[in-house]
Amino acid sequence: GAVVSQHPSWVICKSGTSVKIECRSLDFQATTMFWYRQFPKQSLMLMATSNEGSKATYEQGVEKDKFLINHASLTLSTLTVTSAHPEDSSFYICSASKVSPYNSPLHFGNGTRLTVT
Amino acid sequence: KQEVTQIPAALSVPEGENLVLNCSFTDSAIYNLQWFRQDPGKGLTSLLLIQSSQREQTSGRLNASLDKSSGRSTLYIAASQPGDSATYLCAVSPKAGTALIFGKGTTLSVSS
């Protein structure tokens, strides 16, 4: 089956530093990848949609200069949390949409637990 | 704007019980609906996917139904086991290949 690998699974960083999270589709090509954020006991909220070779589309209220998304190939998208602050501590999870067939279900990574101290 | 609601937020049952989790969505124009399982601190495991043209899907002890016109889906778990304890998330896709919109989930606890 389709596998999405997300790395790292957890990270602790100091306030003011930047953290990069990788999302890879291991056995399929993903035209589109989605980045979600989940706060404790809350639902997954879409942050941005990442399309290969073009700029990401951010949801309302998500700062594009703080959450940098790069989707340089059909198998890799990265999310960089710049100048992280404690309020950025959350669970970040990516999902990928297969190029074909177009109506395939989305496949999710295992998520990254970010803790900013 | 599509909103997904799951009821109840939490549920505790003894082992062996059959149970139903509910999901409702405000806009019936959906492409498909998925049920996921999430263990604490972990990612998502897809359980069942129902296309908009389908009424139900079954996998083992799980059965999911979809009534698109009324904006409802149910996840039926038969003969619950302690290993079923997790948070169950319902999510809808507005269009093919678009992001999912999630409910807040139902946290299930099955006691032995």
Image: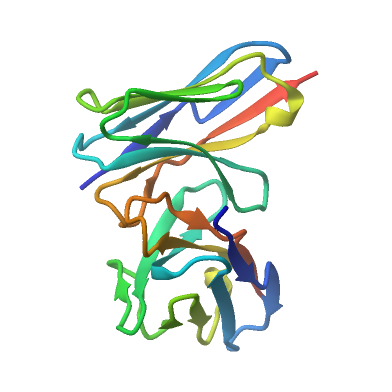
In the rendered view, would you say A60 is above or below B58? below
In the image, taking residue B99 as reference, residue B105 lies left or right, namely: right
- Of the pair A82 and A51, the residue shown nearer to us: A51
Name the residue at the top extreme: B17
Point out residue B13 in the picture as x, y percentages from the top left corner.
66, 16
Quadrant of residue A30 in the image?
Answer: bottom left
Q: Quadrant of residue B110?
A: top right
Position of A2 compared to B85: left or right?
Answer: left
**Coordinates of residue A51 in the picture (x, y in percent):** 34, 75
| Count of number-bearing discs | 0
In the figure, is residue B80 to the left or right of B107?
right
Task: Using the image, determine if residue A23 lies above or below residue B71.
Answer: below
User: Residue at 67% across / 73% down in the picture?
Assistant: A8
Q: Position of residue A42 (x, y in %)?
A: 49, 48
Residue at 54% of width from left, 72% of height from top? A23
Point 67% across, 18% down: residue = B80
Quarter of the image that includes the C terminus of chain A: bottom right
Please tell me which residue lies in front, A117 or A17: A17
- The colouring scheme, among rainbow, by chain, secondary structure or one colour, is rainbow
- Looking at the image, residue B76 lies above or below residue A53: above
Q: Position of residue B62 (x, y in %)?
A: 55, 23
